[in-house]
Image (cartoon, rainbow, N blue to C red):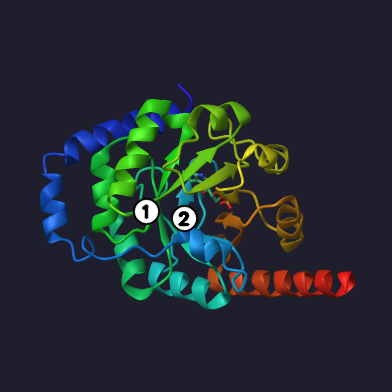
């Protein structure tokens, strides 16, 4: 069993345990259920913003503990002040050290779009995402069969949520892309082997039809890389470890985005 298969097997167990709470109860009790979502698509493609989706991730199966002491309140606010377009919040406890509580705290203090980063295998988790204040959910091609993925995406849309489809190769893209998807994320990290290569993004982008927002995910640690990805056609850039590993993640994000804006300005000038 590779790590992804193990996570997914555990997720099915977790959902089976939780589903004894009727989904309708989650909705009735949530102040977010009637509320409108904030569009990840709009924020990421807004030219005034950086396109950076900053991720709060305490640990991961590939890196172990990355930051066990960061405050989700302070860091999420700091990421937005630094110029991030949106936030990605890990809610998986076992492998990533996150929680629904983290996302609720982030929702309380931020108006931006929030991606609930988890391993969705069941409609229950989508209702849960909506009930804790998320705007967008992640569906991972490597973890779901195409029929199930499509029906989960349709269900998310019916609740007003946006859908980010994550792929790692052309075959996953061909198999899993459907009309309910809003954004396509190309994960530079292979979730089965943890190998990271930026070429994954650069080689796949031309296969994504133009009506989907294109995001490059994982292993980004240099503003020059964003310049390169942007030139290739990416609109969003998902960054986790490079910020959160710092003792002051929000400061790391601030410095990074400042540097990126300088590079952008220089590129515009050199064209003029
Ligand atoms: O920390 P990084 O290398 O910047 O990566 C962020 C993000 O792309 C990564 O955490 C991620 C991408 N897809 C996922 C699916 C589940 C959990 C986590 C992820």
Q: Which residue is mark 2?
A: 57
Looking at the image, which residue is at 62% across and 69% down? 47
Task: Report which quarter residue 30 is drawn in.
Answer: bottom left
Tell me residue 266's x, y (percent): 83, 73
Closer to the camera in the image, 124 or 151: 151
Other-residue count near label 2 (Cα within 10 Å), few / some / many at <14 / 14–19 / ≥20: many
Q: Quadrant of residue 174?
A: top right
Whether disc 2's CB lies below 8 Å from ligand 1 is answered yes
At x 37% / y 53%, what residue is drawn? 98
| Residue drawn at point x = 52 percent, y = 71 percent | 79
Residue 75 position (above or below residue 101)? below
The tag on residue 31 is none
In the rendered view of the protein, which quadrant contains the C terminus?
Answer: bottom right
N-terminal-most mark, 1 or 2: 2
In this orientation, does residue 120 appear?
no
Residue in view at x 60 percent, y 40 percent? 189
Does residue 48 appear in this view? yes
Residue 147 location, x and y as percent? Answer: 38, 27
Label 1 – label 2 distance at C-alpha = 7 Å
Residue 97 percent location from the top left of the image: 39, 51
Q: Is 231 on the left or on the right of 103, as rendered? A: right
Judging from the image, what secondary structure is the residue with disc 2 in? loop
Which label number is shown at residue 98? 1
Q: Is residue 21 left or right of residue 78?
A: left
How many residues crowd around disc 1 within 10 Å: few (fewer than 14), some, or many (20 or more)? many
Q: Secondary structure at mark 1?
A: loop
Residue at the farthest top position: 1
Residue nearest the observer in this picture, 242 or 77? 77
Q: Quadrant of the N terminus?
A: top left
> Badges 1 and 2: C-beta atoms under 8 Å apart?
yes
Residue 165 image position (x, y, % from top left) = 48, 42
């Amino acid at each position: 069993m590779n790590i992804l298969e193990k996570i997914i097997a555990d997720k099915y167990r977790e959902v089976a345990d939780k589903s004894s709470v009727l989904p309708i109860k989650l909705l009735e009790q949530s102040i977010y259920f009637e509320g409108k979502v904030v569009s990840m698509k709009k924020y990421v493609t807004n030219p005034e913003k950086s396109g950076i989706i900053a991720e709060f991730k305490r640990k991961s199966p590939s890196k172990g503990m990355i930051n066990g002491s960061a405050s989700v309140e302070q860091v999420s606010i700091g990421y937005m002040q630094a110029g991030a377009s949106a936030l990605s919040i890990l809610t998986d406890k076992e492998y990533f050290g996150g929680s629904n509580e983290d996302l609720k705290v982030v929702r309380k203090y931020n108006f931006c779009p929030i991606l609930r980063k988890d391993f969705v295998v069941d409609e229950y988790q989508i209702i849960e995402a909506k009930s804790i204040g998320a705007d967008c959910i992640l569906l991972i091609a490597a973890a779901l069969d195409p029929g199930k993925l499509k029906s989960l995406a349709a269900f998310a849309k019916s609740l007003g949520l946006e859908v980010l489809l994550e792929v790692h190769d052309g075959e996953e893209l061909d198999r899993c892309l459907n009309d309910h998807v809003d954004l396509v994320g190309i994960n530079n990290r292979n979730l089965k082997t943890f190998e990271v290569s930026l070429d994954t993004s650069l080689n796949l982008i031309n296969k994504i039809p133009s009506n989907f927002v294109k995001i490059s995910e994982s292993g980004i640690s240099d503003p020059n890389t964003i310049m390169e990805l942007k030139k290739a056609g990416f609109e969003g850039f998902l960054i986790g470890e490079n910020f959160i590993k710092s003792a002051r993640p929000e400061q790391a994000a601030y410095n990074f985005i400042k540097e990126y804006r300088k590079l952008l300005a220089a590129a515009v000038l050199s064209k003029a």
